Image (cartoon, rainbow, N blue to C red):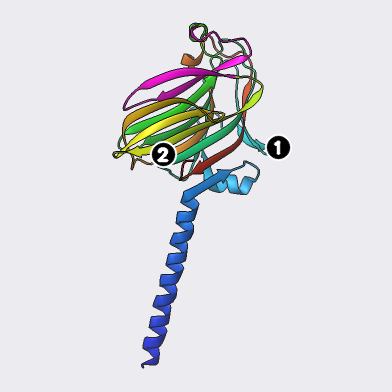
Amino acid sequence: MNPNFKKVSFLILTLLFTNCGSNRLFMKQKMAFTENFNDPETFQKNWIDNSWKSPALHQLENNHLKIKTRPNTEDRVKVRSKNTFTTGSYTWRIFIPEFKLYEQVSIGAFLYHNEKEEFEFDFEIGSGKKADREKINLKDDEAIVFCVSQFSPSNSSHFWVKMEEYHNFTMQLLDVDGFYFVKWFINDTLIKELQTEVKSNIKFKAHCSLENLFFMGDKPPTKENYVLFDFFEYKKKTD
């Protein structure tokens, strides 16, 4: 056999095995992804600032992602994943601080797609408007939680959690006949289900945010607000 042919064959086989190994590693990474917010290098590799017309007021602190907004502003401070995801389970563990009643600030744990079309599935957590709080008889130490599909269809429901506590917020995206069926959970309790018109091949980026949103209260925030994200986890297979 020609020695040069042997060398070329060896190189081709090496490249094939290397490529297969890389593909397996890529698939393994796509099957599960966990961010514990405890390593700046890993955070920079996997996340990017996505703040809207406001300073990037976020940092890693004591093994958390801490996000802040300023008083009397329209700050919208956000980070988003560099990776994209489809069907699976998404969990954000979040410390919900004490909010001043009726002030316009909202914690966001959400999935967003904005390429040719726009789609979004949300948890929005804050004090909320007085009228919305009264609808579900919230106590002063409870925050309102909106579980939302922004498009296809637009649909919103509200629930609650205690302030000054950690809570797990989970979404499951399932493929039903080629479209996403979405489930929302708080602390592993199923609270909402929705069949959407969003095709199940649409890819989403995960977001963590704190935003001074006008529709989440009756008056502008009068103090600096913060939120602590303990971890984010994605699993391809739902339990």
Q: Is residue 36 left or right of residue 5?
A: right
Residue designated by label 2 = 204
Instruction: Label 1, secondary structure: give it.
Output: loop
Q: How far apart are marks 2 and 1 (CA)?
A: 28 Å
Quadrant in the picture for the N terminus: bottom left
- For label 1, the residue is 62
The residue located at (39%, 82%) in the rendering is: 8
Question: Can you give x and y, in whole percent of width and height, for residue 135 in the image?
Answer: 48, 7
188 left or right of 114 in image = right
Q: Dot 2: what SS?
A: loop
> Does the magenta-highlighted stretch encompass residue 235?
no
Residue beneath the point at 58% across and 44% down: 43
Neighbor class of circle 1 (other Cα within 10 Å; few <14, some 14-19, many 20+) is few
The picture quadrant where one finds residue 59 is: top right
Question: Do the numbered discs 2 and 1 sit on residues whose CB atoms are within 8 Å?
Answer: no
Is 13 placed above or below 152 here? below
- Residue 30 x, y percent position in the rendering: 46, 50
Callout 1, which amino acid? Asn
